[in-house]
Amino acid sequence: MHAKIAFSPHAHAKIKSIDTSRAWRIPGVKAVITGAYYPVLTGSPLADRPPIAMDKVRYYGEPVALVVAEEEYIAEMAALQIQVDYEVLPVVLSPSEALQTGAPLIHEHLAAYEISEQAYPEPGTNIANRTRIRKGNMEEGWRNSEHIVTVQVRLPQSDHAAMEVRCSIAEILPGGKVNIHSASQSPYVIQKDISRYFHIPLHEVTVHTPLVGGSYGGKSAVQLEYLAYLASLAVGGRAVKLVNSRELDMVSSPVHIGLESTIKLGCTREGKIMAAEILHLFDGGAYSDRGAIMSRAGATDCTGPYRIDNVQCDSLCMYTNHPYSTSFRGFGHPELTFAMERAMDRMADRLNMDPLVLRYMNAIGPGDTTPTQTLLNRSNIGDLRTCITKLKTLIDWNDRPRAEINGHLIKATGICCFWKNSNTPTNAGAGAMIKFNPDGSIHLLCGAVEIGQGTRTALTQILAERFRMDDRKIQIRMDIETDKDPELWKTVASRSTFLVGNAILQAAEDAIMQLKNMASIVLQCPPADLDVGGGRVFRKTRPELGVAIEQIANGYTFPNGNTIGSQVIGRGSYTMRNITLLDPITGRGNTGPEWTVGAQAVEVELNTRDYTYRIVKAATVIDAGRVINPGFARAQVTGGMSMGLSLASREAFRFNPNGAILNRQFRTYKLIRYGEQPEYFVDFVETPHLEAPYGLRGIGEHGLIGMSAALANSLSAAAGVELNQLPLTPEMIWRTMHDSV
Amino acid sequence: MSSFDADHYRVELQVNGEQQTVRVRAAETLLYTLRDHLGLTGCKPGCNNGDCGACTILVDGQPMKSCLMLTVEAWGKQITTIEGLAGSAVQRAFAQNQAFQCGYCTPGFIMNCEGLRHVHPQADEETVRIWLESNICRCTSYEEIHRAVKDVFAINTDLNRNLNTDK
Amino acid sequence: MIPFDFEYFHPSTVQMAVDLFQNLQRQGKRPMYYAGGTEIITFARVNSIQPGAVIDLKSIPECNVLAMQKDILVIGACVTLSALSEADPFPLLSAAAQGVADQTSRNKITLGGNISGKIHYREAVLPLLLANSRMVIAGTQGIRVTSIHKVFNQQMRLTSGEFLVQVLIDRDDVSLPFAYFKKREIGHVGYPLVTVAALRKNDEMRTAFSGVCAFPFRSAAIEQVLNDSSLPITARIERATGKLPASLLDNVEGSAAYREFVLKQTMADAVHRLERR
């Protein structure tokens, strides 16, 4: 069967009544349900969202009813017949509006919401979470500052726009077992949440996730799965499929967070940054979801990769009557980086200093501390200065003027630096299992979802490297089944290779021990004298003496038939270490195992007649720790850069004054297309992270992080005005020019 | 085509060289029919609105967005989906150049390139751009797709030099 | 997914199509003529239109003609935009066709469909307005041929049951000097912010616009001003902008104020391009 969503045409309204009778009258309709069918509040860290609106709607596109029918078009037809009587309420359309005293309250019962991770909502306001950073002494910082600049930036909400829309199938078997199929980054979270909210024993929920058609964070939230489950429940457990239309995928399902930020920087005459005071107002939309945690990331890494001893930051996740937000590639970092890097360029201007030199001079490194007062070393911070130096060469920074004028065309380059740590729960972890087949080949089982990032290939390579074997003899499925595959928290935050990779290495050790023990009997020597590689276990001192793995993988059979040992199955698991909660007053704590740092540049050619521009070049130098697969690594970085340039140059939801979204299709919500790509330059620095498999660092999100800042810096240099708002459309540049005269 | 009942139509299609008969609603798009009646899930619904190109197939050799065509319109036409290609040069070029990540848009890109190869075997850079603008890829930077296309069409010029000149 | 049913017909003659329409209309089926169908499909899937029947015109031979007949270029309403630009019988029309949607969609979008649609822009009509083309229209009274200016005013104004069969353009008009500029919010694909089509005949410049107002138009008043060589270009453009037939469009592609800025610049580009020749 098929389910379809009836959605709210209002951004903020009381639901006075819902009339489903017209929908019911359509032949083929099997169920129509509303929020009253199963009242529950979902979400993490704050349980603030009903899967189907109850009592009121808080954003345009919010589900108000669900129709189930035998045929998809019938369900759609019936969903159009749901009649809701609304009482329209005043709307809050920006985070700064939401903060004003007297702003309409979006959640009246904020105090009553269950909190499952660290978050500090402020009941009676529209603040879903506030994170405070208090480091050093601000008075001293300002006292030692010769120059002070203040910059305000604004980034609108936008969309993940994965080419595959979100989709889920649920069925409830007669015995009570629940099967969910979902294109998701979080199959194990779906399992837990379905169990938690619908009171089903955890082991009776199985989630199947296929190869996912792109996600970029957007498919880490649990949303359609609840609806599909409720739809199935409403038709006696039959399998029900729910597929978003593109329009609903853009506005009803969660989106990319927005930000309004004010940043004040102080520095000495020589350019050493002494103080930073930052206020981030994240536009989390109608429900907090991971927006609450993204706003925390906006605080914990608020300074960007610079050493600043005196820092004050308040980062707020604000409720607004916009669509609700969830994880987006970069997780709060593209946003904070835009604010910080615009301020850095402003400061360089003020000092009349080379912006690259200013960044190099303040680059954070071993011995420095972060805003959360974590002490840095080479392993956890990497080497930003080498990234900057390499970038300088890569883009011929010194050999060219800042702006080259050719008639009405001006070429200019903008640069930026970034860093990112993960803000996972303190106990995020992963497991892995390796099963040997009788021919010595391996089945690798793990919970990392393949979303196009190549994780499963990289994990296979890590295992092959450990066994020094041909990776074609390792089999890994492209799908996940939560009842078979060891758990991974979520496939997010560029953490999969780290968490699962560590689990795999441990599983490999486990299997190697088993193989050596068995081989030691066959070869009649202590296990410690043996090594594994090339499909054999052999004596370290006399490698020609050994036994093929296929002879011992399922136990070893002596010529007389006597068999010793049994199938080799390696198991391993890994959980984040030394991650702590943050002190609520100062923000002191440790948010993740390591930072990935990097430096980026964008060269543009601006047409000063009409403010159209061409992105000529884009460059990234990133400290990857260790590059596992050079092809994939480059593709991840350039893919991120492309998405970042698309976001920076054109992506934004446009709202009407009532909060309805006007661009819900790719015709009007534009994405970068073939032929617009600049020339890409990517280079790597390799400073190993000692906790990670082979020293690698996360790189899946990072290409995106600085693109908005670098593009804005390049266009600001070319246009000669401060461009502090996204998206950087020609109209935005025109308007800024126009307003500045 | 004969009318089956008030709302359903029997349509004969040639799909990947095979004769197929389907019973469809007049309002049904070819994309839906190919996927849900014929199990050819290689054509991907990305927007159902003609904006993304993920559902591109060939109709009588020309790229067509299967979400923008009613099945009843396709009566008697030769339809080729990605399942109908076997080891084509375009597919090979995409694979060799890693011109995909999640792979969702890839069949559409490949079918469009395949159509271009038939219509304009000697397509130049500008023609390639005009054609491939019809498809959206969200994962790659298009650099990899450009490399794949260069292999197929033996284009030697640097993409950047020729782009954006129509501003 | 179109959330309702309709009937589908594909008549093979003009007369059959007209008769079908009448019959279906009488039965209360709200029939629509269907050419490329892209707009009908995309509007129907979001429930903006609910035809009870569609009459596909693509099997009618007259609707598929693309030929120079004596001194007249005949273009059938069902000729696709990509076929038009590929054959290139009228370069200004090719340019306009090439700007609509994207290449793959243009394999489906037809000239007649683009002109007769409801979306604001309908840029394929601009060259036809400039070439003073004639339109062959079928209806219950048979076939009539009329000036485009009589039937196209902001949109096609046909009586119920009529449809566009062909467009006729004089051979003399297809190779006149022209300029065509389509400016978008950003990128190479999408609706226009401003589209200016211009054509020069007998030392007079003709101009037509899309994206500027909520409909495509050609304006005698604007042409009169733009052709007034006694005035400097900037003054002509300033005056022309004051003579728009309706308020400037203000939507997600761009604000009215920005459109005005782009319009002035684009008009200037068009004038420069054509006056230089």
Image (cartoon, coloured by chain):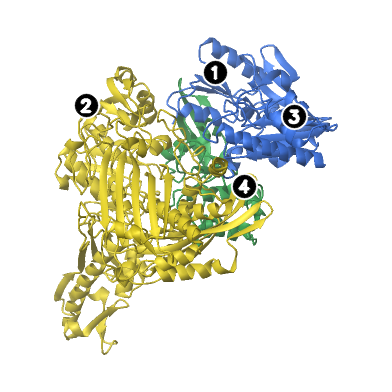
Circle 4 Cα neighbour tier, 10 Å, few/some/many (<14 / 14–19 / ≥20): some
Circle 3 Cα neighbour tier, 10 Å, few/some/many (<14 / 14–19 / ≥20): many
Whole-angstrom CA distance, mark 1 to mark 3, is: 32 Å
Label 4 secondary element: helix
Parent chain of label 2: A
Whole-angstrom CA distance, mark 1 to mark 4, is: 35 Å
The percent coordinates of residue A242 (x first, y second) are: 33, 36
Chain in yellow in the render: A
User: Which residue shows up at 65% across the image and 35% down it?
Assistant: C263
Residue at the far right in the pictured view: C202
- The amino acid marked with disc number 2 is Ala
In the picture, residue A533 is in which quadrant? bottom left
The residue labelled by disc 2 is A36
* Same chain assignment for discs 3 and 4: no
Parent chain of label 4: B
Instruction: Relative to A123, say whether A54 is above or below.
Output: above
Side of A565 where A736 appears, left or right: right
The percent coordinates of residue A654 (x first, y second) are: 46, 36
The residue labelled by disc 1 is C31
The residue labelled by disc 3 is C130
Frontmost of labels 1 and 4 is 4
Determine whether label 4 and label 2 are within 8 Å by CB: no
Parent chain of label 3: C
